Amino acid sequence: MRLRLGLLIVAIVTALLGTLLIAVYIGRLAADVTAGREMVEVYVATRHVNRDTAADKLINRGLLKKMRIPRKYVAEGAVSSLKGLGNKVLLAPLDRGEQLTDSILSLPTSGLTTPRNMLAVAVPIEDIALINGRIKAGDRVTIFVTLEPGKDGKDVTRIVLSRVLVLAAEKSGKGQTGGQTGKASLTLAVTPGDAEKLVFSSQQGTIWAGLWPPGVKSLPSTGGQGVDSLF
């Protein structure tokens, strides 16, 4: 009799525990669905806006519009209120439909305006590697490095940084041979970790830059190229 009673109690407890676990799972699933559908107010550009445009101009000339979008599509640091923008300016161009974020807004300074939590790092580079000087402040670039030799003792060219903000691109005169290719410097806004990659690449290899088309946010990834993969 006691054995049957014990088994009955175990069965009841197991059933209650199973019901509780199912209820918790359903509750979490419902919360995830609700969070995905939650709408958040953000501000997006009504047309392409140039770098250094003042926040007051963005507001007064109707260059921004308020939109409600699902939270999962909201960019990190997206601006939800125009109050307090003051005399801030854009650190980078803003494409039509792109969200306004805190990271591309800053108070104007007499020198370089570097996004928050970023470093301004300059590296020497051949002018031809900057598309003969056509890369300018505000552009987004991909940085390539050629190492001779690279890993495993083999020469290789690889992308080390992708879609990086250009703070300045300046010529510094003719090359040592006196030819058409001149020396230049490229100043980029990078994280501390990417700054290490950039400095190491410039010290150990040859730097090249690729210019991103306006409005493009991603490009296919690559695995690098060497003699073995090239031919």
Image: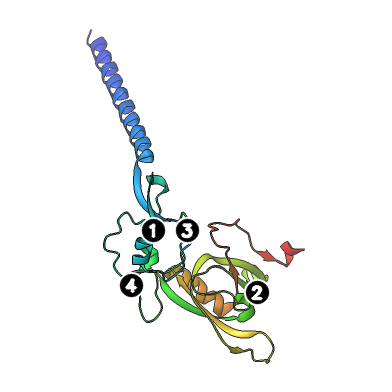
Q: Residues within 10 Å of mark 3 (few under 14, many from 20)?
A: some
Q: CA distance from mark 4 to mark 3?
A: 22 Å
Q: CA distance from mark 3 to mark 2?
A: 46 Å
Amino acid type, residue under disc 4 in the picture: Leu
Q: Residues within 10 Å of mark 2 (few under 14, many from 20)?
A: few
* Residue depth check, mark 1 versus mark 3: number of the one nearer the observer: 1
Q: Which of the labelled discs sits on residue 62, or is there none?
A: 1
Q: Residue 62 versus residue 13: which sits nearer the camera? A: 62
Badge 3 marks a residue whose secondary structure is loop
Q: Residue 181 versus residue 161: which sits nearer the camera? A: 181
Q: Earlier in the sequence, mark 4 or mark 2?
A: 4
In the displayed structure, would residue 152 be above or below residue 74? below
Residue corresponding to mark 2: 149
- Residue pushed farthest front? 61
Residue 36 makes an appearance in the image: yes
Badge 1 marks a residue whose secondary structure is loop
Q: Residue at x 33, y 72 (%)?
A: 107
Marks 4/2 in contact by CB < 8 Å: the verdict is no
Residue corresponding to mark 3: 47
Q: Residue at x 46, y 77 (%)?
A: 121
Badge 2 marks a residue whose secondary structure is loop
Amino acid type, residue under disc 3 in the picture: Arg
Q: CA distance from mark 4 to mark 1?
A: 21 Å
Q: How many marks?
A: 4
- Residue pushed farthest top? 1
